[in-house]
C-alpha cells in the first residue's frame, strides 16, 4: 500500500473522524468535506514532491476577537476564540535546509534557512514569515530544517479572522512536529509568531491574534506583562443559549492600511507618555479628565479619544467574562454592542477614507436587523474587513441572506469555536 493509500485509510478511520469533529464541529456534511479536503491536499503534496516518508498534517485556526478591540498592544485585556476555519499544511522533511512552500492560489516559494537573518526585501511576504518563524524556533533552542509543504486555507486573507496568525502558528507547528517533539507551549508559539510578523513581515501587531490561534478555545488574555500574558480558558456554548457567531466580510481592501493600524497603538502610547507611562494600562478616565487641558496641548484629540476608548474597553472585558461565567447572555450582548459603539465613535477604526464605508454600512444593517435581539461590532483591526455579530439562531438565515445581498455571496461565515490551537495528524 502506497503512502497516499495509507493516508486515505487513516482519514476514513473512526478515530480520525472523531478528531475532525473536534476541529470542525458537527455540521452536516462536515466529515465528508474535510476528508475530501485532507485527501486532496495529500495527493497534491505527492504530485508536487513525490511519495515521501515522514509526511505529516498540521492545522492552525483562525481567530475571532470577541472583546477588547485594540487593547492588547497597550497592556490590556481581551476575550477571543479560535474558530473552525484553519490553515492546513501537508509537510515532509528534507535532508537540506531549503523550504519549498506551495500555497493554493499563490506562486511557489523557496527559502534557504542556512541564513535566518531578516531581509528587507522579504517584508510583507510569506517568505519573510517562514524565515522569521525559523529564527524564533532556533532561538528557543529547538531544531529547524528544510521541508516540502502544500498548504490550503479557509482563513481567507482579508477575512478578519487573522490569516497571518494562522499561517505563523501553523509554521511553528511544522518545525516543532517535523524536527522536535511537538511539545512547544502555546505561549511560545504565539511569541515566535508575533516576532516574525513584527520583525520579518514588518507589521506592528500586538499579540492577540497569535495568542488566540495558538491557545485554542475561548480564552481571556491579560497582556499587562507582554512577555508572559495571563491566559484563562473559558467554557461557554453560545449555540446552546440560542446564538450564532456570524462574521461578515464586507470586501473592503486592506491595501495601504498599515499606517492606519500603526497609528492606533502609537497614539495611545503618546497619550500614556504624558503620564510617564509606556502604555495606557492603569490609567483612568479621571486621570485624563484631570489633565485634559494640558493633554490637548501635547497630543491630538484623536489620541485622547483613543485613550478614552482603551480605558473603557479594557474595563469591559472582565465584565464580559463575568457575564459569561454567570450565564447572563443579555448583559454580555449589551457589553458587545457598547464595545462596538466605542470603536466606531472614539477608537475610529471603522473606515480609513470616505471612499469605502462598507463596514459602517454592515454595522448599520446589523443594528436594523438585530436591534433588541443580538449584538454587533467591528471585528479585529478595522478600517476594512469584517464585523462580528451575535445572531439569534432563528434569525441566522435571514441575517445571512440580507448581508450577502449587500456584500456578495459567501460574505458571511457562521463560526464554531474550535477547542484546540495548533494541531497535528501523523501516520
Image: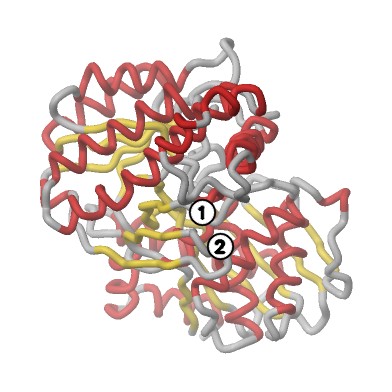
Tell me if 384 is positioned left or right of 139 in this view.
left
Q: Nearer the viewer, residue 116 or 338?
A: 338
Q: How many marks?
A: 2
Quadrant of the image occupied by residue 129: bottom right
Tell me if 398 is positioned left or right of 282 in this view.
left
| Residue at x 40% of width, y 79% of height | 10
Q: Nearer the viewer, residue 201 or 15?
A: 201
Label 1 sits on residue: 75
Label 2 sits on residue: 226
Where residue 229 appears, x then y in whole percent? 48, 66
Q: Secondary structure at mark 2?
A: loop
| Residue at x 46% of width, y 77% of height | 425
Q: Residues within 10 Å of mark 2 (few under 14, many from 20)?
A: some
| Residue at x 28% of width, y 29% of height | 400
Where residue 275 appears, x then y in whole percent? 59, 43
Is there any visible trace of residue 173 in the rendered image? yes
Where residue 35 appears, x then y in whole percent? 39, 64
Q: Nearer the viewer, residue 265 or 282?
A: 282
Residue, far top: 354
Q: Residues within 10 Å of mark 1 (few under 14, many from 20)?
A: many
**Mark 2 and mark 1 in contact (Cβ < 8 Å)?**
yes
Q: Earlier along the polypeptide chain: callout 1 or callout 2? A: 1
Is there any visible trace of residue 39 in the rendered image? no
Amino acid at each position: 500500500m502506497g503512502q497516499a493509500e495509507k493516508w486515505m485509510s487513516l482519514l476514513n478511520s473512526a478515530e480520525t473522524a472523531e478528531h475532525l469533529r473536534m476541529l470542525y464541529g458537527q455540521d452536516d456534511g462536515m466529515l465528508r468535506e474535510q476528508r475530501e479536503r485532507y485527501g486532496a491536499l495529500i495527493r497534491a503534496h505527492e504530485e508536487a514532491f513525490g511519495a515521501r516518508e515522514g509526511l505529516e498534517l498540521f492545522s492552525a485556526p483562525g481567530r475571532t476577537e470577541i472583546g477588547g478591540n485594540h487593547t492588547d498592544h497597550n497592556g490590556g485585556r481581551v476575550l477571543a476564540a479560535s474558530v473552525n476555519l484553519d490553515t492546513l499544511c501537508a509537510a515532509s522533511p528534507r535532508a537540506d535546509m531549503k523550504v519549498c512552500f506551495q500555497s493554493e492560489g499563490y506562486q511557489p516559494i523557496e527559502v534557504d534557512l542556512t541564513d535566518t537573518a531578516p531581509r528587507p526585501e522579504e517584508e510583507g511576504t510569506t517568505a519573510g514569515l517562514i524565515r522569521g518563524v525559523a529564527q524564533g524556533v532556533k532561538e528557543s533552542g529547538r531544531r529547524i530544517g528544510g521541508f516540502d509543504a502544500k498548504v490550503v486555507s479557509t482563513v481567507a486573507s482579508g477575512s478578519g479572522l487573522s490569516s497571518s496568525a494562522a499561517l505563523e502558528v501553523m509554521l511553528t507547528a511544522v518545525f516543532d512536529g517535523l524536527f522536535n517533539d511537538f511539545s512547544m507551549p502555546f505561549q511560545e508559539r504565539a511569541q515566535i509568531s508575533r516576532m516574525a510578523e513584527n520583525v520579518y513581515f514588518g507589521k506592528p501587531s500586538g499579540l492577540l491574534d497569535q495568542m488566540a490561534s495558538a491557545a485554542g478555545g475561548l480564552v481571556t488574555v491579560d497582556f499587562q506583562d507582554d512577555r508572559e500574558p495571563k491566559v484563562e480558558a473559558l467554557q461557554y456554548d453560545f449555540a446552546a443559549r440560542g446564538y450564532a457567531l456570524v462574521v461578515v466580510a464586507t470586501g473592503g481592501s486592506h491595501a495601504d492600511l498599515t499606517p492606519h493600524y500603526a497609528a492606533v497603538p502609537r497614539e495611545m502610547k503618546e497619550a500614556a507618555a504624558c503620564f510617564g507611562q509606556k502604555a495606557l494600562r492603569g490609567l483612568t478616565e479621571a486621570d485624563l479628565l484631570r489633565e485634559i487641558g494640558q493633554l490637548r496641548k501635547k497630543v491630538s484629540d484623536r489620541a485622547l479619544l483613543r485613550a478614552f476608548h482603551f480605558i473603557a474597553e479594557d474595563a469591559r472585558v472582565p465584565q464580559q467574562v463575568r457575564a459569561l461565567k454567570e450565564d447572563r447572555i443579555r448583559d454580555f450582548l449589551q457589553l458587545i454592542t457598547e464595545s462596538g459603539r466605542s470603536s466606531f465613535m472614539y477608537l475610529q477604526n471603522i473606515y480609513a477614507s470616505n471612499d469605502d464605508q462598507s463596514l459602517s454600512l454592515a454595522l448599520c444593517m446589523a443594528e436594523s436587523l438585530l436591534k433588541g435581539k443580538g449584538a454587533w461590532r467591528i471585528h479585529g483591526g478595522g478600517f476594512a474587513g469584517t464585523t462580528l455579530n451575535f445572531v439569534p439562531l432563528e434569525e441566522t438565515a435571514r441575517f445571512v441572506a440580507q448581508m450577502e445581498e449587500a456584500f456578495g455571496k459567501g460574505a458571511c461565515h457562521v463560526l464554531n469555536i474550535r477547542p484546540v490551537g495548533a494541531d497535528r495528524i501523523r501516520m
